[in-house]
Image (cartoon, rainbow, N blue to C red):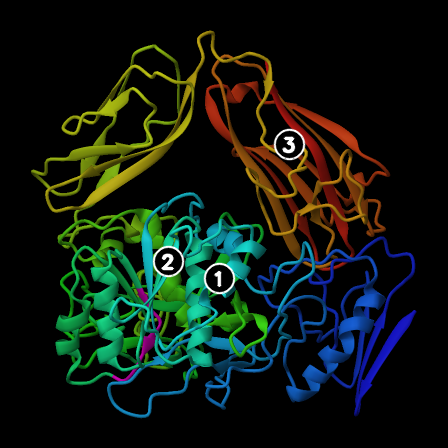
Amino acid sequence: MAVILTVGVTVATAVTPMNVRHSKSCGAPLVRYVMNLTYLTNSHPPSGTHPPMEGSSLHSRTPNRVRRLTRRGLTAVLSAVALASGGLLALAGPSAASAAPSSAAPAAAASTTAHTQRLCSEPTKAGYMACHALARTDLIQHLSLSPNVLPSGYGPTDLQSAYALPASAGAGATVAIIDAYDDPNAESDLASYRSTYGLPACTTANGCFRKADQNGGTSYPTADAGWAGEISLDVDMVSAVCPQCHILLVEANQPSMADLGTAVNRAVTMGAKYVSNSYGGSEGATDPSSDASYFNHPGVAITVSSGDSGYGVEYPAASQYVTSVGGTSLSRASGTPRGWSEKVWGSSAGGNGAGSGCSAYTAKPSWQTDSGCAKRTVADVSAVADPATGLAVYDSYQASGWNVYGGTSASAPIVASVYALAGTPASGTYPSSYPYAHASSLNDVTSGANGSCGNYLCTAQAGYDGPTGLGTPNGTAAFTNGSTGGNTVTVTNPGNQSTTVNTAVSLQIKATDSGTGQTLTYSATGLPAGLSVNASSGLISGTPTATGSSNVTVTAKDGTNASGSTSFTWTVNPVGGGCNASQLFGNPGFETGSASPWTATPAVIDNSSSEAAHSGTWKAWLDGYGSTHTDSLAQSVTIPSGCHATLTFWVHIDTSETTASIAYDKLTVQAGSSTLATYSNLNKNTGYAQKSFDLSSFAGQTVSVKFTGTEDVSLQTSFVIDDTALNIS
């Protein structure tokens, strides 16, 4: 059966075999964007087919592909004709903006693999700034999505996975967003983004969200569609990286450095310890004065986008007091320990990509020691910014909802939020120095370029380089209190602890300092009730008074404010060892309809009729895309000391592979770093089979039980898991 859509000379053909069990439309190429456009389901994709955008979070599990093309196909083909040639066509599912906001510059910004448009017009006079947000124009916008469908572009779990970030940290911390003009829909659009991804509400009513003018009041400036898109990108990135953080949006009267700088000062006055700035303009002789007036705020982490025009320096990214944030292209890399890879956003041809280089006016901060610039070097660190591997954003003010955005406007709020996850900066210090004291705690980006300059200022290398700085976040350690002197404090992890309630404990924490003659001061968060740490010796002692499991972080700081920390789990068991027969998994059959307390790739938790649950209506459905893809499902549990533990789960394997000898698609089951079993398309079955594994060797430890499904380039295999249990006795 085929659906033929014809516009001018462009023909789109989709053939769907009637015996296809189901399809997941974002996972396989749907359209050949040339004269005759043909895609055959469950066949190897034709040569030259454009793949979907790398990192798309979109999942759509509807078995009726013909019906989808009838409803959305004509719109998609019309959009393709309007794009001229070479664009990515998002036929199935929510993507975004083919129409740019009214204030956007008419010319599209260059990109190697995606059609984009700047949201803000370029400055027309000195002292004025432009936002650094880029919107994809080769995707279809959607104001709303179908149930269980996520938008294109990276979402919260993608960023948390790529940068090894904790989802539960940052509670109560306020991240300020500085932008020009007003976004009348800022709060409602934020609500749409957060509800789509299952994040806690962040509203004025619950105290999480606040919007202010540059004077701290509610006389908001004139609304502007381009800057409204920038605001949506900024608040969505804070939500994605630090869901527990509060958000303060301060709107400047206009995009002048004077007004934007006044808004920065207002945010700090209002108590923000983390301030994100996603704008920039030409350097000038007044920059040192602006530095002193607006950005010299010790004890406050201020991040600034490095720019979107490739090799070259902008202000305020060149300020000596801020963390200048460059940009990368972020891609999934299955089979690697990290699971992701990054390179410089840009090309050796220059003209687009992250900004970098030597400032002409700003003095070099003491912690920056590269030799290629006598003055300030841009950037310090980086994060994803390439719109071709961009972020899902929701903006409805003179825009049409979901789109994929990029630019270093994304990387600045991402890094500001990582600072918030890391904890309050030390009083009197400049947080921009922290990564230089902990460079080994970053993902070093070693490939790519943003121009041709002949050295590290525009070309990635091991260690520091201009486009990506010291690297991208790898957890929060690089963003914790460092020191301008460069001392490194290392705290030895004591391992997970398991003790008994009402029984005295004593645990000595050990730490070292690279500096000589330093005295360390210890502190701890998350200790079980009844325990405390000695600030001078690092000894944790006391008698725990309640059962339960706690996430403990111990920090040691020296006299220069350099610090190090380590985290571990402390479980307090009932008298008798806590081995009363019980089941440890939360949400074992997924019947809550959401993943928590599991962590899962978006849309893995599913209740569609295409694959039946073992019991109830919900199950975990990994893979089934028919293209290169990885899904995961994991939960960490603490197994009490002395207990016998058994992991069980039911699994159904459904495949379109026809081989009887080659394992193309695989499901790996792990407990911690131990692989318990590997299943593949060769293990297909018609119903569910129960599997069982002894995890008693993990007693007294916190262990992560993880299911990882990987598919190759064609022919789907679905791994469906239900009714899990981790029983102790």
Q: Nearer the viewer, residue 605 or 488?
A: 605
Give the residue displayed 20% in from the left and 61% down from the top: 269
Q: Mark 3 near mark 1, Cβ–Cβ under 8 Å?
A: no
Q: Read off the residue under disc 3.
A: 588
* Occupied quadrant, residue 48: bottom right
Q: How many marks?
A: 3
Does dot 2 land on a helix, a strand or a loop? strand
Residue 365 coordinates in the image, percent (x, y): 15, 66
Give the residue displayed 28% in from the left and 79% down from the top: 313
Distance CA(mark 2)–CA(mark 1): 10 Å
Query: Compared to 695, does 258 lie above or below?
Result: below
* Occupied quadrant, residue 369: bottom left
Select label 3 or label 1 by which is in front.
Answer: 1
Q: In the visual, does 360 lie left or right of 182?
A: left
Query: Compared to 501, does 538 lie above or below?
Result: below
In the orientation shown, which residue stands out farthest toward the top?
576
Residue 505 coordinates in the image, percent (x, y): 30, 15
Give the residue displayed 66% in from the left and 37% down from the top: 590
Please state, as top left, top right, bottom left or bottom right, where the C terminus lies in the image.
top right
**Mark 3 residue crowding within 10 angstroms, few (<14) / some (14–19) / many (20+):** many
* Occupied quadrant, residue 722: top right
Whether residue 638 appears in magenta in the rendering, the answer is no
Q: Mark 2 near mark 1, Cβ–Cβ under 8 Å?
A: yes
Q: Read off the residue under disc 1.
A: 190
- Can residue 290 be seen here? yes
Q: Amino acid at mark 2?
A: Ile
Q: Nearer the viewer, residue 666 or 400?
A: 400
Q: In the visual, does 526 lie left or right of 297?
A: right
Q: What is the number of the mark on residue 247?
A: 2
Does dot 3 land on a helix, a strand or a loop? loop
